[in-house]
Image (cartoon, rainbow, N blue to C red):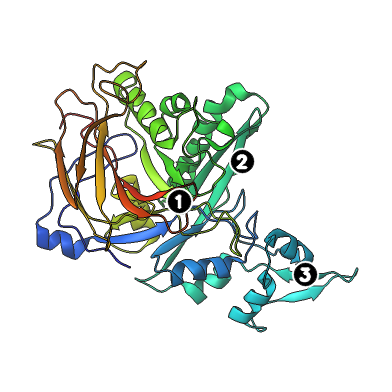
Amino acid sequence: MKLVRPQAIILAASAFTLIQQPPLPAQDQTESLHWYRGNTHTHSLWSDGNDFPEMITAWYKDQGYDFMALSDHNVLAEGERWMSLDAVAKRQRALGRGAMQKYLERWGDEWVETRKTEAGAEEVRLKTLAEYRGKLEKPGEFLILQAEEISNSAGGKPIHINAINLETVIPAIKSDDAGDLRQVMGDVVTEVRKQEQQTGRPILAHLNHPNFQWAITAEDLAHVAEMRFFEVYNGHPGVNHLGDAERPGDERIWDIANTIRIAELDRAPLLGVATDDSHTYHGGDVSPGRGWVMVQAPALEPNALVEAMQAGNFYASSGVSLQSIDWDAKSRTLSLAIVPEEGATYSTAFIGTRSGYDATRPEGENGIGEVFAELEGTEVRFTLPEDALYLRATITSSARHGNPSFPEQKKQAWTQPVGWRAE
């Protein structure tokens, strides 16, 4: 479902600088910009997902998404690829009708290609993006972005980075030395930028699930200047989203990293995305529909979407929809209008860090990621304190998530940091 178009959203960032622009007149803004819902982290049988790419893409289209990206590990959906039916069945790991049966029912014998090997094994050919794109895309209504999860590592620690709107595969970097972790992160994003320059197409790179295997710390994210985007929410149940008693969750990582970047390194803050990271589509626990981005762009086109995200014109969501995000740089006031869901109430935490913060304190008063105010209702606004380094908002609904990735999960949304550099 499309959101009501906002009258003003004033969030923009270049690769290393946040540009806060004056709002367009309401009529022009409404006519030129639209909200688009999409997922940038999805897996299929091309790597470690358990369904065919057409089936997965069709699910997102049927659920009302405007765009999605299949981001299989270290591969693009191109070239000839056959997979044994036994392997497809084993990958499914679920009861009920098999993936092949569902695939045939939806697409038919004329589309689904199978063969027998000399040894008698049955195989199915995985379709390429170039083949199925024309079956699912519709100009102005649904778009597929080409993507890759570049699955790097350092000393065995996973460093997974999604690249969205790619033209060719970017090889993963693997180092035996855990001390190379930050170097690997920076080098991968540098390779993304090189392809961007060579092809002339914008490419978004975002770090995935920092707490997966507890691989990447807030300090790591802070000190890699090339990294500008990360997953503040990933719908995979195994990514330690909430942290534990001794290690911070993803939101806390965001505040620690941004405090270091702004206060100590004079660097632009990280921007947060929400994704599914879906792998299972037949009743498994790594299922789709958990997290997404809402991008405000002039058109549903690959370059327009990526450029809008690079400019910071988006928010992350796991179920809460926003009608408008209005940052007034002159008054340093952030105003939000929430699209109400029947029976739900909303609480918005306005969060930031003061310039005189105490790094040893928890996120309480004068700590990193202090909650400056928590306001109830569907229309809220807050003026950034004069001594604050930045401001962001987390909106939490009283409604439970319909497909939770952790116990008692509520629907949420996250806005991008503003006010971090004097206008």
Left or right position of 354 against 242: left
> Looking at the rendering, in which quadrant would you find the C terminus?
top left
The x and y percentages for residue 400 are: 39, 54
Q: Earlier in the sequence, mark 3 or mark 2?
A: 3
The x and y percentages for residue 419 are: 20, 34
- Give how far apart the Cα atoms at labels 3 and 2 are: 28 Å
Question: Is residue 327 visible to the viewer in this orientation of the structure?
Answer: no
> Looking at the rendering, in which quadrant would you find the N terminus?
bottom left
User: Disc 1 designates what residue?
Assistant: 275
The x and y percentages for residue 213 are: 59, 34
Image point (53%, 56%), residue name: 42
Q: Are marks 1 and 2 in contact (CB under 8 Å)?
A: no
Question: Is residue 287 visible to the viewer in this orientation of the structure?
Answer: yes
Q: Quadrant of residue 117?
A: bottom right
Left or right position of 96 against 270: right
Image point (60%, 42%), residue name: 151
User: Disc 2 designates what residue?
Assistant: 172
Q: Secondary structure at mark 2?
A: loop
Q: Is residue 299 above or below residue 161?
A: below
Label 2, residues with CA under 10 Å away: few <14, some 14-19, many ≥20: some
Q: Tell me the kind of residue under disc 3.
A: Glu
Report the mark closest to the observer, 3 or 2.
3
Q: Is residue 328 above or below residue 363?
A: below
Q: Quadrant of residue 160?
A: top right
User: Disc 3 designates what residue?
Assistant: 123
Q: Are marks 1 and 3 in contact (CB under 8 Å)?
A: no
